[in-house]
Image (spheres, helix red, strand yellow):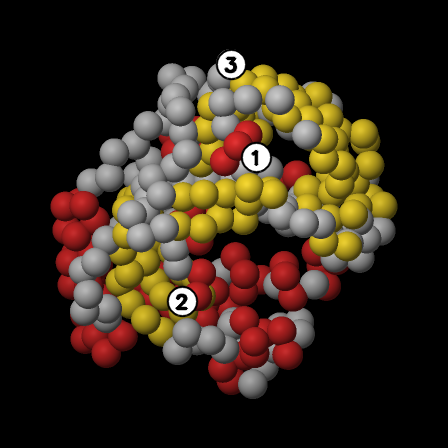
Amino acid sequence: MKWVGNVRKMGSSVDIHGHVTYQWCGADVLEPLETISLEPWIGKHVQVTFDGIIHCSETGRRIKKTYGDGLSYDAFMKSPLACPSIIRPELSRIHEGIALRDEEWERANHLQPHVVYISQTSHLKVGVTRATNVPSRWVDQGAVGGIVLANAPYRQLAGEIEVALKSMMSDRTHWRAMLLEVNLDGEALLDAKEECLETLGLTYESFFEDSDEITALRYPVLTYLPKVTSSKLDKRPCISGRLVGIKGQYLMFEDGQVWNVRAHAGYRVSVEVG
């Protein structure tokens, strides 16, 4: 099989047993291409070749460097997809009727129910996402499990709750450690939730999630690697090898190299499998 197009973030789905499956997504500049199941790729030789061309994932304009998820610098500075409240949810003001960049987009995406959660990647971390993004947000992080702490009616409030917890818990993912084999620690998630709720106290009690349900996630990985090295197409325009797994947004190759697909959004590549 040979595929040619512009890279996009991989899609994912989770079945009732927590098994994660991935879909290869792409575009011909801006025109979406048909998605492809990645399950048949695992265990086969995969070669990704970069031809030196990058297109902005929002405007389609040819660019030399990407910012955010495949954006040009101009798009990154103007697009609602990269507004400050994406990285820092507490900055959103659309609940006050004030848009940072695009009122219609922010109403559709930030004036919506959000959750504050704890996920386990290589460690426990706190985060915020739209309610409809659970559990796909945890899959993108490469988390082996997650639990909801609180439900908020809009993004800013969820971000405010997250900020109140950052002194006791990181919001960062350590990608290298995440790609190693990590065993879910449900007891640690439950203990962390209890501690977080105690820290938040009465101020946010009406938003607390009563359910202690833990979502466990299992990734399509044949072999976990003892050591990994990130490969970037700018420095290494051809990445190839036997694909032994997918976790987070990374393709994992038998020789220890890993490739962050999402970080290469907009890159025009050819992919050969088999």
The correct choice, above or below, for 46 with respect to 88 in the image is above
The correct choice, above or below, for 54 with respect to 189 in the image is above
Quick one: 135 or 94, which is closer to the camera? Answer: 135
Quadrant for the C terminus, please.
top right
Distance from label 3 to label 1 (Cα)?
15 Å
Q: Residue at x 41, y 29 (%)?
A: 221
Q: Is residue 81 visible?
A: yes
Q: Is residue 73 visible?
A: no
Distance from label 1 to label 2 (Cα)?
25 Å
Tell me which amino acid carries mark 3: Asp
First in sequence: mark 3 vs mark 1: 3
Q: Which residue is mark 2?
A: 131
Q: Position of residue 93 (x, y in %)?
A: 52, 77
Q: Which mark is residue 260?
A: 1
**Mark 1 Cα shell of 10 Å, populated few (<14), some (14-19), many (≥20):** many
First in sequence: mark 2 vs mark 3: 2
**Could you tell me if the residues under marks 3 and 1 are in contact, i.e. CB atoms within 8 Å?**
no
SS class, disc 1: strand
Q: Which mark is residue 97?
A: none
The correct choice, above or below, for 248 with respect to 148 in the image is above
Q: Position of residue 223 (x, y in %)?
A: 39, 21
Q: Which residue is mark 3?
A: 255
Viewer-nearest of labels 3 and 1?
A: 3
Q: Position of residue 148 (x, y in %)?
A: 28, 61
SS class, disc 2: helix
Quick one: 254 or 168, which is closer to the camera? Answer: 254
Image quarter for residue 212? bottom left
Quick one: 26 or 128, which is closer to the camera? Answer: 26
Horizontally, residue 64 falls left or right of residue 209, namely right
SS class, disc 3: loop
Horizontally, residue 216 falls left or right of residue 91, namely left
Tell me which amino acid carries mark 2: Ala
